[in-house]
Image (spheres, rainbow, N blue to C red):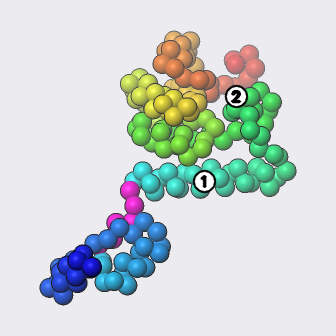
C-alpha cells in the first residue's frame, strides 16, 4: 500500500514511474497503473528465450517430418546419421556461446572461417560452452594441420574443415 501511495504521488507530481514488465500480463498491469518506464527483460533472458524458441521450432520440424529425436547424445546421433542442431557462433563472445548451449543446441559451431576469431576468443568460447556441458565444433580459417591441431588442443570437440572440395582433400 505504501509503494502504491508513493507511486501515485510521484505520478501526480509529473515524475516517471517504472516497473518490471517481463510478461505481457505484467506490461498490461503496469501500463494500466500509469507506469511508463517499463523494464521488459534482460539481454540474457531475451536472447535465451529467442534461441530456445528457434531450437524448439527446428526440433518440432524434424519430428513433424517423421524423424523421432532420440534421447541419445549428439555424438551418438551423428554416428547414427540422425539430425543434430548446430548454430554458427559468429560473435566472439563467451556469453553468447553459453546462451546458445543453455538454449538446447546439440553442438555449437565457432565460425572462424568467415568471422575471424583470435585464439583467445576461440579458447574462451569453447570453455564457456563446456562449462554448460556443450559440445563445440570449430570451423577454422584454413585447413592446415597446424590450425586444426591448435584448435583441437584448445578443447574443441570436432572440426568442420573449410573449403573441402573432394574426398582426396578431406
SS at badge 1 = helix
- Residue that badge 2 annotates: 75
Image spot of residue 140 (x, y percent)? 53, 25
Q: Residue at x 62, y 50 (%)?
A: 55
Image spot of residue 76 (x, y percent)? 74, 28
Image spot of residue 49 (x, y percent)? 52, 55
151 left or right, relative to 158: left
- Residue that badge 1 annotates: 54
Q: Is residue 40 magenta?
A: yes
Vertically, is 118 above or below 70? above
- Crowd class of label 1 (few under 14; some 14 to 19; many from 20; radius 10 Å): some
Q: Residue at x 66, y 55 (%)?
A: 57
Vertically, is 40 above or below 151? below
- Crowd class of label 2 (few under 14; some 14 to 19; many from 20; radius 10 Å): some
Q: Is residue 53 magenta?
A: no
SS at badge 2 = helix
Image spot of residue 59 (x, y percent)? 70, 50
Q: Name the one closer to the observer, 37 or 19.
A: 19
- Residue interval drawn in magenta: 37-42
Amino acid at each position: 500500500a505504501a509503494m502504491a501511495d508513493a507511486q501515485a504521488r510521484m505520478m501526480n507530481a509529473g515524475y516517471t514511474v517504472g516497473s518490471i514488465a517481463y510478461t505481457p500480463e505484467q506490461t498490461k498491469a503496469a501500463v494500466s497503473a500509469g507506469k511508463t518506464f517499463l523494464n521488459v527483460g534482460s539481454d540474457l533472458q531475451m536472447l535465451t528465450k529467442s534461441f530456445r524458441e528457434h531450437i524448439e521450432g527446428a526440433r518440432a520440424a524434424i519430428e513433424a517430418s517423421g524423424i523421432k529425436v532420440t534421447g541419445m547424445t549428439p555424438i551418438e546421433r551423428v554416428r547414427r546419421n540422425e539430425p543434430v542442431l548446430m548454430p554458427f557462433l559468429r560473435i566472439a563472445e563467451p556469453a553468447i556461446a553459453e546462451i546458445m548451449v543453455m538454449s538446447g543446441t546439440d553442438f555449437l559451431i565457432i565460425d572462424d572461417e568467415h568471422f575471424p576469431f583470435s585464439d583467445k576468443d576461440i579458447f574462451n568460447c569453447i570453455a564457456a560452452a563446456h562449462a554448460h556441458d556443450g559440445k563445440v565444433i570449430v570451423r577454422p580459417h584454413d585447413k592446415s594441420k597446424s590450425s586444426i591441431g591448435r584448435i583441437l588442443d584448445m578443447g574443441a570437440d570436432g572440426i568442420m574443415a573449410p573449403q573441402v572440395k573432394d574426398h582426396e582433400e578431406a
